[in-house]
Amino acid sequence: MRALVLSVAAVRELRQFRRRHSDLNERLDRVLMQMTEDIFQPSLKTHKLQGDMGDLWACSLNYDYRLIFEFQANADAGTEDIHLPALGAHDEVF
């Protein structure tokens, strides 16, 4: 199990996303929970990005929206954390 680490900017972005897309709040909660349990669950469609974003990964919130994240080592726990730098429509985050 990995921990989901959110920066101040990510928390703000999530809050704004929830206000604009209240119909997706339940789905967003479920996806965030799935990310911590098993980031490679088939339903998340997790994939590594390429090009300039080659260090990042993406998973699907739904057909239109993606969560962009990266893995970072957590030396204290001996695990990897998930850092979430971006959330938005496919065309917005890529």
Image (cartoon, grey):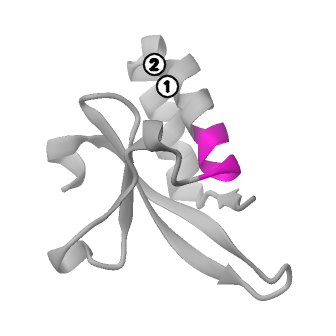
**Residue at 45%, 32% in the rendered image:** 16
Instruction: Determine the residue located farthest toward the front in the rendered image.
Output: 42
In the rendered structure, the answer to whether residue 8 lies left or right of residue 23 reads right
The x and y percentages for residue 88 are 31, 41
In the rendered structure, the answer to whether residue 38 lies left or right of residue 77 reads left
Per the rendered image, the range of residues in magenta is 32-38
Mark 1 / mark 2, whichever is N-terminal? 1
The quadrant where residue 74 appears? bottom right
**Number of residues whose C-alpha sits closer than 10 Å to that of mark 1, classed few (under 14), some (14–19) or many (20 or more):** some
On residue 74, which mark appears? Answer: none
The x and y percentages for residue 42 are 45, 42
Q: Quadrant of the C terminus?
A: bottom left
Instruction: Report the magenta stretch's main SS.
Output: helix
**Residue at 60%, 29% in the rendered image:** 30
The x and y percentages for residue 54 are 27, 78
The x and y percentages for residue 44 are 44, 41
Q: From the viewer's perspective, is the residue at label 1 or at label 2 nearer?
A: 2
Instruction: Determine the residue located farthest toward the top in the rendered image.
Output: 23
Judge whether residue 25 is colored magenta.
Answer: no
**Number of residues whose C-alpha sits closer than 10 Å to that of mark 2, classed few (under 14), some (14–19) or many (20 or more):** some
**Residue at 40%, 34% in the rendered image:** 61
Judge whether residue 37 is colored magenta.
Answer: yes
Kind of element beneath mark 1: helix
Kind of element beneath mark 2: helix
Given contact means CB atoms under 8 Å apart, are the residues at marks 1 and 2 in contact?
Answer: yes
Residue corresponding to mark 1: 18
Amino acid, disc 1: Arg
Q: Quadrant of the N terminus?
A: bottom right
Residue corresponding to mark 2: 24
Amino acid, disc 2: Leu
In the rendered structure, the answer to whether residue 52 lies left or right of residue 76 reads left
